[in-house]
Amino acid sequence: MFKSKRTGLPLTKRQREVLHFTARGMTARQIAAELHISPKTVDCHRLVLKMELGVRTLAELIRYEIYERAAIRRKREEWLG
C-alpha cells in the first residue's frame, strides 16, 4: 500500500493514478488527457506526492513507485506461497 511518509495515511486514488502514469513515462499533458483534468492539476498532484513521499525530484518519485510495486509483488508472492 502506498502511504504518505509524512502522515502515514494512504495516498488518494487520484494520487496513485498520477504516480502510476508518471512512472510509466507519461507527460503531464498525457496524464491530464487520460484523467480528464488540467496539466497544471497533474503538476500539483506531483508536487504534493513529492512532499508526501519525501522525495525531491521526478526521478526519485518514479523510483519510489517502481520500488513500492516490486515490494507489493514480493509480499503477495510470499503470502500466496
Image (tube, rainbow, N blue to C red):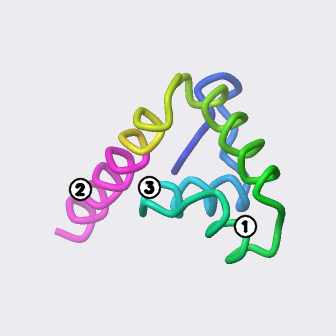
Q: Where is residue 20 in the image (x, y as percent from the top left)?
A: 51, 60
Type of secondary structure dominating the magenta stretch: helix
Q: Relative to 1, is 51 on the left or the right? A: right
The residues tagged by marks 3 and 1 sit, at their Cα atoms, a distance apart of 14 Å
Residue 5's image quarter?
top right
Judged from the image, the secondary structure of the residue bearing numbered disc 2 is: helix
Judged from the image, the secondary structure of the residue bearing numbered disc 3 is: helix
Q: In this picture, is 79 found above or below 44?
A: below
User: In the image, which is nearer the foreground, mark 3 or mark 2?
Assistant: 3
User: Which residue position holds label 3?
Assistant: 23
- First reached walking from the N terminus: tag 3 or tag 1: 3
Residue 32's disc is 1
Q: Position of residue 24 (x, y in %)?
A: 42, 63
User: Which residue position holds label 2?
Assistant: 74
Question: Given the image, on which type of amino acid does mark 3 rest?
Answer: Ala
- First reached walking from the N terminus: tag 2 or tag 1: 1
Judged from the image, the secondary structure of the residue bearing numbered disc 1 is: helix
**Local crowd at mark 3 within 10 Å, few (<14), some, or many (≥20)?**
some
Q: Relative to 12, is 3 on the left or the right? A: left
Question: Given the image, on which type of amino acid does mark 1 rest?
Answer: Ala
Q: Give the range drawn in magenta.
A: 65-81
Residue in the foreground of this view, choosing between 39 and 14: 39
Q: Do the residues labelled 3 and 2 touch (CB within 8 Å)?
A: no
Residue 3's image quarter?
top right
Residue 41's disc is none
